[in-house]
Image (cartoon, helix red, strand yellow):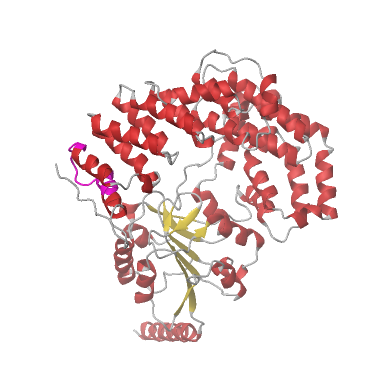
Amino acid sequence: MAMSTKASFLLLLLLAAAWGADARAEPRTVCTITVNSADEKEAFRRYLPDENYRFVELVERGRPDWLASACRQDIRCDLLVISGHFDGSTVFYSDQLDVSEYLPVEEMERVACSDSCPGLFAPLKEVYLFGCNTLNAEAVRFPSPEVARSLVRAGYSPADAERRARILDQRHGESSRDRMRRIFRNVPVIYGFSSTAPLGPTAASRLARYFQSAPATELGSGRVSSRLLGQFAAESMIAVSGIGDSDPHAVYRREVCQFLDDRRSPAEKLRFVHEILGREMAEVRLYFERIEKLFASFSESERRAPAFVEALGEITRDDVARERYLRFAADADHAVIRARMIRLAGTLGWLSPTGQRTELARMIGDLLARKSMNAADISLVCTLNKDRELEQERNRLPPPGEAGNVSHAAVLACLGSADGRARMLSALASDDGDDVEIARVYLAHQPITDVDELRTVVRAITRMTRAGTQAQALEALARQRLTDRESLDELAGLFATTQSVEVQRAIAAVFIRADVQLLARPEVVRALNRHRLKSSGGDDIIDVLIRRLQVSAAPSPSGGIMAVPERL
């Protein structure tokens, strides 16, 4: 009994000492980044005593550089709570119209890689990410087939090439879980959601139940709480740790940081790019977007610096890397990637402006050799020729693989062909929905500005016999923002005679985007009311149009008669 009493006394002394030490300890700092609802933050604040926890909101409303401001204040965070919608890859954002603040993941990566804000991330014991898919392990990037083909060209067997491509896929997959683990390096516990997260009020309720049952020593301990995971089990909450120095992904993190670290000069970053360009082209392809973005970030003064010019010159003179790169670019599966790689080759000094036009023309020739092309290919060619630089290459192109193909005509029209443009104007009034879509894509880049062209197209559309494609053509026409009264009157006549409410809605969309002063006449308003077809679902775009025209047709202060709409 004596031994038991003595042991109890010693235990009480130890507990008292521990309590005293804890009482004298500095309060822990809970940093919050609230870009949407504050429900989760308030749940933490409600249940954590003020004497032990200090709360710091890092977001400063109305200040776009709030994260940099927090860094300059040297705030040191023990716990971090981020609340906001998450798009699954790039940004935390708000669905509240009066909130403009957001948190780009790339900015978080830059801060973490630059170690420009060591107090913010380095001391963290726990991170709480309240957003959908914040720890989703699914890759958002996938290597395309040209990666495996390039590995075969490099000497791998087809089986080894596929295996190597899978390894690179895992390394460069850029899942949200991988990115969060890179950002919060060495943080023992990161809580987040592998799929859908609960809304703020639900999350706050779950947190309240957790705080009511968890011991005070559990929060911020750096150990995964099974109680917390249990409260959010229905919402796929999981916990991971940040990448440590011995983690298999640590090497990749260091390489990613070479692009983002503010402490590295532009010339140093260029030399790292040169190192990558000497690797297998499969890996160059997977780093391509980062290389492209890096060059876009350099200012003119940085590009003129002697060290930068020297580092870029070393890349320009690397003929081996140039040959391998251009061969890979020519084999790209997607034309848009091929075009971007050609542009980057120009930036690297591997292609002159003339050389870039030649390579782009070769790419367009390869597109024309296909049986058909999709809308993205046509949009790309029109975009590439927005300054009409490629028109001089048109006559050097091989003949299309299939004469008369509408998509081929669209490509030639994008390159300035008059015959191609005439074919596009005709295709807009086609009964083939695919042809109408191709014409729509083309006209989005090369709109109708000639009134005779416009009137010819409008007349052709009014004679179409299939309501579905006619509505589709009218939707494309709406984007042209008509300012010709004759064309608008022609469409008003179609509104009165069509038996399709879908066509009437499409005409209303044309009118809403047109010059309202040409339509705001009493007879137009009366005709719309008299001939509109009944439709279910209450007000639609036709009602919106009529109300708008009624307001515009109202008398001015100098006089006039307000149009009184006729009812059905």
Q: Nearer the viewer, residue 448 or 54?
A: 448
| Quarter of the figure with residue 305 | bottom right
Q: Nearer the viewer, residue 118 or 376?
A: 376
Residue that appears at 19% across and 43% down: 537
Q: Is residue 131 left or right of residue 404?
A: left
Residue that appears at 51% across and 46% down: 175
Residue 28 appears in the rendering: yes
Residue 503 appears in the rendering: no
On the rendered image, what quadrant is the C terminus found in?
A: top left
Q: Residue 539: say if magenta.
A: yes
Image vertical order of residue 11 relative to residue 450, above or below: below
Residue that appears at 82% across and 48% down: 311
Task: Give, as a single range, the part of the protein colored magenta.
Answer: 531-546
The spot of residue 10 in percent (x, y) is 43, 84
Image vertical order of residue 106 relative to residue 389, above or below: below
The spot of residue 232 in percent (x, y) is 33, 57
Q: Residue 452: say if magenta.
A: no
Image vertical order of residue 388 relative to residue 243, above or below: above
